[in-house]
Image (cartoon, grey):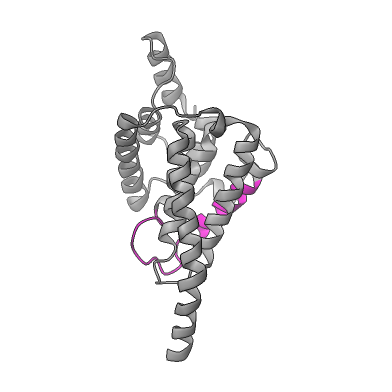
């Protein structure tokens, strides 16, 4: 059954006195399961928390400080679709069947998931719940979805090979980690980084387009 090992791990931790297992442990357990690891599997395994987790997984690649040449556009498009669902109040993720089969544990995907687990585990050492109601209330969920949509759109329209998609995508990743950990400080930091990224795309992106137009 999809996510069975993650559910069993949560149950074991609850019995041992930890009623709220760490996100990094659940994600690590999920990625180590023998079955194929697809986007649909991730959504089914983590339920309502899959919104933030999916945003982290999808935007981690464009968040790398490397020009992607537009190959991450499909990830950003999926993130925008899911963010729109969060804005309208959906409690579960819907994606087309074709996207549900998106492999998250290919050669590159496995590496991304491994790095994600390490980064989340590191943050969990220092993060704590701060103003959690500002990350879990319905208005906060709507605002979170709106910001994810805006930052993902900025990453999507960033000129190819410019590297300008990095900051908006990184903003989404950090915001999503803050939501998962109920840490408003992380959410605020991600929002600031994302806003700087949007400003960079609007300002420097226009300059890049003009320069490329002159060259070509």
Q: In terms of image quadrants, where is residue 125?
A: top left
Location of residue 31 with respect to 17 vertically, above or below? below
> Where in the figure is residue 181, as x and y percent of width and height?
44, 31
Location of residue 211 with respect to 72 vertically, above or below? below
Q: Quadrant of the C terminus?
A: bottom left
Residue 147 counted in the magenta span: no
Residue nearest the viewer, comparing 120 with 77: 120
Given the current orientation, which residue lies at the most extreme right position?
88
Q: Is residue 100 left or right of residue 138?
A: left
Residue nearest the viewer, comparing 156 with 188: 188
Location of residue 150 with respect to 174 vertically, above or below? below
Residue nearest the viewer, comparing 91 with 187: 187
Res. 145 visible in picture: yes
Residue 66 counted in the magenta span: yes
> Where in the figure is residue 214, as x and y percent of width and height?
46, 90
> Where in the figure is residue 157, as x and y percent of width and height?
53, 67
Residue nearest the viewer, comparing 75 with 192: 192
Q: Residue at x 44, y 27 (%)?
A: 129
Res. 177 visible in picture: no
Q: How many marks?
A: 0
The region drawn magenta spans 61-84
Location of residue 38 with respect to 206 vertically, above or below? above
Q: Residue at x 42, y 90 (%)?
A: 215
Q: Residue at x 50, y 31 (%)?
A: 46
> Where in the figure is residue 162, as x and y percent of width and height?
40, 71
């Amino acid at each position: 059954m999809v996510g069975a090992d993650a559910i069993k791990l949560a149950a074991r931790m609850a019995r041992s006195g930890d009623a709220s297992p760490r996100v990094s442990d659940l994600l690590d357990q999920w990625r180590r399961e023998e079955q194929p690891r697809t986007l649909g599997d991730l959504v089914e395994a983590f339920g309502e928390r899959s919104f933030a987790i999916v945003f982290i997984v999808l935007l981690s690649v464009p968040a790398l400080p490397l020009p992607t040449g537009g190959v991450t556009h499909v990830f950003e498009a999926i993130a925008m679709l899911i963010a729109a669902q969060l804005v309208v109040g959906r409690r579960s993720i819907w994606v087309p069947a074709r996207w549900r089969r998106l492999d998250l544990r290919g050669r590159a995907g496995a590496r991304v998931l491994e790095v994600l687990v390490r980064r989340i585990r590191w943050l969990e050492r220092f993060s704590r719940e701060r103003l959690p109601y500002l990350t879990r209330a319905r208005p906060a969920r709507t605002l979170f979805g709106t910001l994810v949509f805006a930052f993902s759109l900025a990453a999507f329209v960033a000129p190819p090979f410019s590297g300008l998609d990095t900051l908006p995508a990184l903003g989404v990743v950090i915001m999503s980690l803050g939501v998962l950990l109920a840490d408003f400080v992380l959410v605020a930091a991600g929002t600031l980084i994302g806003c700087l990224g949007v400003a960079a795309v609007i300002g420097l992106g226009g300059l890049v387009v003009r320069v490329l137009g002159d060259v070509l």
